[in-house]
Structure formats: C-alpha cells, structure tokens
Image: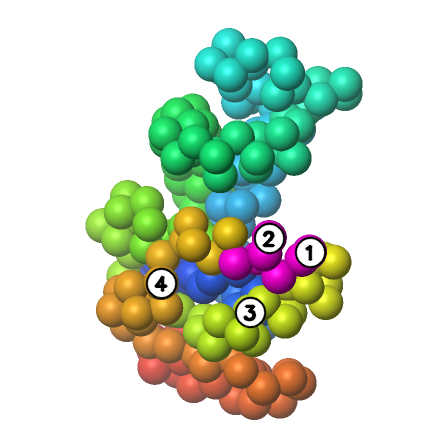
Amino acid sequence: MPAQRPFHLGLTGGIGSGKSTVAGLLARRGAAVVDADAISRQLTLPGGAAMPAIACEFGAEFVAADGGLDRDAMRTRVFAEPAARGRLEAIIHPLVGDETTRQARQAAEAGAACVVFDVPLLVESGRWRPRLDAVLVVDCTEDRQIERVMQRSGWTREAVESVLRNQASRLQRLAAADACIYNQRPGLEALEAQVQEAWQCFGL
C-alpha cells in the first residue's frame, strides 16, 4: 500500500524576516525542509548544473575565476536591468523545481509527515501555490528587516532597500498566507511559541 503523501507546507518571508530560523524550528519538530535558496546556490557553484546556460546567456564576465557564478556582478546586472532577472530565473527555476521534487519524493519515501518548502520568492514566482497544502509567512516590519540584514551581513541600508524593492511587499505576502508568524521581537521564546501554534494549526 503506498505511503500517505506528506503535508506540503510553503514557507516564505522577506529578507531578514527570520524565515530560516523558523525553518530550523520546523525541522526540529520533524519536518523535512527543502530549501529552494540552497538548491539555487548549489546550481550556481563551480560545476553547478546552471552554469553552462548562464555563461551562454550572459557571457563569461558573469563566471567567477573558480567557475561559479560571479554573484556581485549578477546582482548588479539584475538590479540595473529587470529583464535580466527574468532571463536568469528562466534558467534556474526549472532546475530548482526538478530538485525540489526529487527531495520531496525522497522525504515522502523516508516517511516524513510534513515537507516544508522554504522558498524566499514563493509569492513572486506564482509557480508554487498549486504544489502546496498551505502557506506559512514569516513577517516583521521593513525597518526590522533592514536592521537585521545590516547587522548580520554588513550591507548598507541602500543595498537592503534595493532587495526589498525587488521582493513582494508585506501586504502581498500576507494576502497569500494561510498562517502568519510575526517575528518582530528579538529572542527565540516568542518565535518558538508561534511555530508550535502553527504546527498544531496544520494538524501536524
């Protein structure tokens, strides 16, 4: 008799929202986490499956000396030329889709009751909702996002604001949410309680 399909939970949030921390807390409760961002990074490392197409589409100047993606050069390009983002995503997204499907199938075969798809651009892509049973959004104010990213990454305020402008707004993410975790305050205690509440809300 085939195993029951795991619950498919989409997890998203803007940069600096604390989404990765929430993913870790869900994993501690037994969820299998499929990290779309980590998969995307893997595809653009030296020898990554996306690199030949990226070199062909954008040119050798976007390939670093080690053969991986020159992330700074690409970041500058996509911010300056919005159409370049679409060209890059057309290369990477199908490969990410294939690998997330493989990892989700592997988790189901291992008996996972819940697969969490950790997708930063879940709302923006429009591809994910049909695959999911529910969407969990990690939310906080934009000022808090900026503060966190500046502290952890050393970015300027302008750099963080530029990323925010290229992500869905808070309202767009919240409109897509079946449940929301509001991660404004520092410390894990309040966050832990909200993650547990969401876990129970989805019957897990």
Is residue 181 toward the left or the right of residue 188 in the image?
Answer: left
Residue 57: image location, x then y, percent? 47, 14
Q: For marks 1 and 2, give the CA distance.
A: 6 Å
Residue occupying image coordinates x 64% and y 69%: 148
The amino acid on which the numbered mark 2 sits, given as a three-letter code, is Ala
Residue 29 shows in the view: no
Q: Marks 4 and 2: in contact by CB < 8 Å? A: no
How many marks are shown on the rendered structure? 4
The amino acid on which the numbered mark 3 sits, given as a three-letter code, is Gln
Residue occupying image coordinates x 74% and y 58%: 154
Residue 155, which numbered label? 1
Q: Which residues are magenta?
A: 155-161
The amino acid on which the numbered mark 1 sits, given as a three-letter code, is Trp
Q: Is residue 4 highlighted in magenta? A: no
**Residue 48 figure quarter:** top right
**Element type where label 4 sits in the image:** loop
Residue that badge 2 annotates: 159
Q: Vertical placement of 150 versus 41: above or below?
A: below
Residue 181 shows in the view: yes
Residue that badge 3 annotates: 145
Q: Marks 3 and 1: in contact by CB < 8 Å? A: no
For mark 2, does the 10 Å Cα neighbourhood hold few (<14), some (14 to 19), or many (20 or more) residues? Answer: few
Is residue 11 toward the left or the right of residue 18 in the image?
Answer: left
Tell which tag, 1 or 3, sits nearer the viewer: 1
Q: For marks 3 and 4, give the CA distance.
A: 12 Å
Q: For marks 2 and 4, give the CA distance.
A: 17 Å
**Residue 72 figure quarter:** top right
Q: For marks 3 and 2, give the CA distance.
A: 12 Å
Tell which tag, 2 or 4, sits nearer the viewer: 2
For mark 4, does the 10 Å Cα neighbourhood hold few (<14), some (14 to 19), or many (20 or more) residues? Answer: some
Q: Marks 2 and 1: in contact by CB < 8 Å? A: yes
